[in-house]
Amino acid sequence: MLNFDIFKQKSPKQRFLLILGLVMFVFYVILGFAFIFWKGLNLNIPHWGKIAIGIFLIIYAFIRLLSLGRRD
C-alpha cells in the first residue's frame, strides 16, 4: 500500500529527501526518454540497446517513486 500521508508536516531532513527523490525520479525519466528518442546521442550502442537502456531507466524511476511513497 502507498503511504498517502506523504504531504503531512515533515522534518526538514525528510522534506529535503522527498524533494530530492522527486527530482531524481524526473531525472531518470528524462534520461530514459533521451536514450530512446534523442537521435543526437552519439554512443557506440546499437539502437535496440538504447531502447533497452531507456526502458530500464524509466522502470527504475517508477520503482524509486514507489519506494519513496512507502517510506515513513
Image: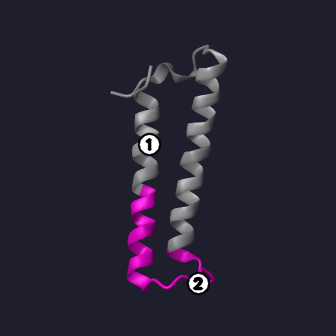
The crowd level at tag 2 (other Cα within 10 Å; few <14, some 14-19, many 20+) is few
- Residue furthest toward the left? 1
Q: Is residue 59 above or below residue 24?
A: below
Q: Quadrant of residue 13?
A: top right
User: Which of the 4 image quarters holds residue 63?
Assistant: top left
- Expressed as whole percent of the image width and height from the top left, the position of residue 25 reads 54, 47
Name the foreground residue: 61 vs 45.
Answer: 45
Q: The disc labelled 2 sits on which kind of residue?
A: Asn
Residue marked by disc 1: 64
Magenta span dominant secondary structure:
helix
SS for tag 2? loop
Residue 43 is situated, as x and y percent measured from the top left of the image, at 54, 82
Q: Is residue 57 magenta?
A: yes
| Residue span colored magenta | 36-58
Q: Which residue is mark 2?
A: 42
Single out the residue that lies furthest toward the front: 44
Point out the image quarter for the C terminus. Answer: top left
Instruction: Give residue 16's quadrant in the image.
Output: top right
Q: Which mark is residue 20?
A: none
Question: Marks 1 and 2: which is nearer the front?
Answer: 2
Q: CA distance from mark 1 to mark 2?
A: 28 Å
| Front one among 7 and 52 | 52
**Residue shown at the point (41%, 65%) measured from the top left:** 55
Task: Tell me if residue 41 is in the magenta stretch.
Answer: yes
| Residue 20 percent location from the top left of the image | 61, 37
